[in-house]
Amino acid sequence: MAVTPGLRRAIELLACPACSSALSLDESSATCPDGHRFDVARQGYLNLLGGPQPANADTPAMIAARGRVHDTGVFAPLRELLGRVCAGRARILEVGSGTGAYLQAALGEAPGSVGVAMDISTAAARGAAKLDPRIAAVVADVWQRFPLADAGLDAVLAIFAPRNFAEFSRVLAPSGQLVVITPEPDHLIELRNTHQLLGLHPQKAASVAAHAKDDFELIDRLRHRSTFAADAALVADLISMGPNAFHELPETVEATELTVSVTVQVFGRR
Ligand SMILES: C[S@@+](CC[C@H](N)C(=O)[O-])C[C@H]1O[C@@H](n2cnc3c(N)ncnc32)[C@H](O)[C@@H]1O
Ligand SMILES: [Zn+2]
């Protein structure tokens, strides 16, 4: 695989990271009129990072664990919720997209839609590139100017991912919406209690809204809470897919009932 159907669809939404001009695709690379050229990886993603991947990017092991967790369907209620929130929005960017599972849900069943999965991890991009023919996988840093044209998107998603509100606002069409999902303190609380995992910000959703307010107004805020039974393998994957994977992992894990608890905030551009 080189250039994917998703990249062909999304190329008009992308922009050269060096000069912000439009990009066009040939058989194996993307180029701009100024002659900047970016090779499409053999695995079908486009690396527009322009430098080495930083140390905090998700590792292949974390991405594999996250993929297995999504495959079990335990986050299916959240995926369904996203599908409803993004219904009718045809051009969607997910930043910090990981495996792209939420982006795919946000695209729904619409065959003509297009998704851009942006992540700083090449392992993530490899997964997203093969997930869905409507999705283009791009390696880029959320803290730099996004390699995306102005005002080209109907929705941007930031799901358990870093947020750059000025760039979100620049790449969204005037009627576009930003969807941010953040964990509540009781999200996977059973794991945090048993395995002394990293804690969560007590007022994350409110803090996100406060940081967004120069660029965005809050349109809707939804709470989602559900529980599921996790066997030991799933528990191990849930621990390994997150930031705790950068610390020491517990030696033994047991099956348990787990809580999903998040806030979904929908913002419109000011
Ligand atoms: C907690 S994961 C969430 C993945 C996905 N949204 C999900 O919920 O399944 C956070 C993701 O953000 C990515 N990430 C971290 N820092 C980033 C940055 N500066 N720019 C782009 N992506 C970043 C990580 O590589 C990782 O895939
Ligand atoms: Zn250029």
Image: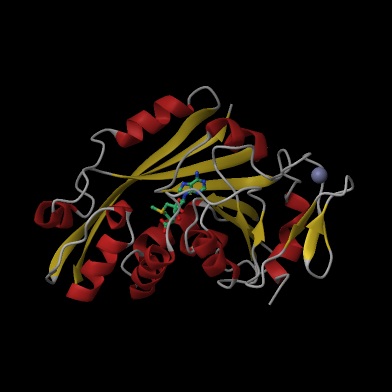
In the figure, residue 210 lies in which quadrant? top left
Depth check, front residue: 221 or 39? 39
Residue drawn at (48%, 24%), measured in percent from left and top? 213
Q: Is residue 231 visible?
A: no
Residue drawn at (46%, 31%), measured in percent from left and top? 218
Q: Residue furthest top?
A: 214
Q: Quick check: 68 above or below 54? A: below
Q: Position of residue 108 (x, y in %)?
A: 55, 64
Q: Position of residue 134 (x, y in %)?
A: 65, 67
Q: Is residue 199 left or right of residue 179?
A: left
Q: Is residue 246 left or right of residue 83?
A: left
Q: Quick check: 182 above or below 227? A: above
Q: Position of residue 84 (x, y in %)?
A: 48, 56
Q: Quick check: 96 above or below 125? A: above
Q: Position of residue 51 (x, y in %)?
A: 62, 48
Depth check, front residue: 3 or 186? 3
Q: Residue furthest right?
A: 33
How many numbered marks have been drawn onto this rendered protein structure? 0
Quadrant into which the N terminus falls: bottom right
Q: Is residue 48 visible?
A: yes
* Colour option used: secondary structure
Residue drawn at (13%, 72%), measured in percent from left and top? 255
Q: Is residue 217 left or right of residue 170?
A: left
Residue drawn at (82%, 47%), measured in percent from left and top? 22
